[in-house]
Amino acid sequence: MPLTDTAIRNAKPNEKPYKLTDGKGLYLLVNKVGKYFRFDYRYRGKRKTLALGVYPDTEVVE
């Protein structure tokens, strides 16, 4: 399911951080402090994570 602004706004923090995925490595990390856009990828066989920004400063364009 693609990330939408409505889905992100409605995401409430749990006791443990969790991910809302958008596909192909993009996800929103939801924790008690805030909501963070992240992108997982592989470089030379190693898993890497790129921090893209904090919601709502970085928004999803629908």
Image (cartoon, rainbow, N blue to C red):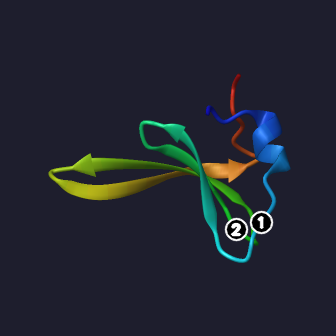
Residue 62 got which mark? none
Nearest to the observer: residue 49 or residue 16 = 16
Q: Which residue: 78% across, 35% down?
A: 5
Residue at 76% across / 72% down in the picture?
32
Whether pointer 2 and pointer 1 mark residues with C-beta atoms closer than 8 Å, the reply is yes
Q: Residue at x 68, y 53 (%)?
A: 54
Dot 1 amino acid type: Pro
Q: Quadrant of the N terminus?
A: top right
Q: Secondary structure at mark 2?
A: loop
Disc 2 versus disc 1: distance between alpha carbons? 5 Å
Residue 60 placement, left or right of 40: right
Mark 1 neighbour density, 10 Å: few (under 14) some (14–19) many (20 or more): some
- The answer to whether 60 is drawn above or below residue 13 in the figure is above
Q: Position of residue 15 (x, y in %)?
A: 73, 77
The one of 17 and 48 positioned closer to us in this rendering: 17
Residue 42: percent from left, percent from top: 26, 49
In terms of sequence position, does the residue under pointer 2 or pointer 1 come before the other? 1
Question: Circle 1 is placed at which residue position?
Answer: 13
Question: Left or right: where does residue 43 sit relative to residue 30?
Answer: left
Q: Is residue 9 left or right of residue 41?
A: right
In the rendered image, which residue does mark 2 sit on? 31
Residue projecting furthest to the left: 44
Residue drawn at x 73%, y 49% is 55
Give the secondary structure at mark 1. loop
Closer to the camera in the image, 32 or 2: 2
Count residues near mark 2 (Cα–Cα under 10 Å), then give few for <14, some for 14-19, many for 20+: some
Q: Is residue 49 above or below residue 6?
A: below
Amino acid at dot 2: Asn
Total numbered circles: 2
Which quadrant is home to the C terminus?
top right
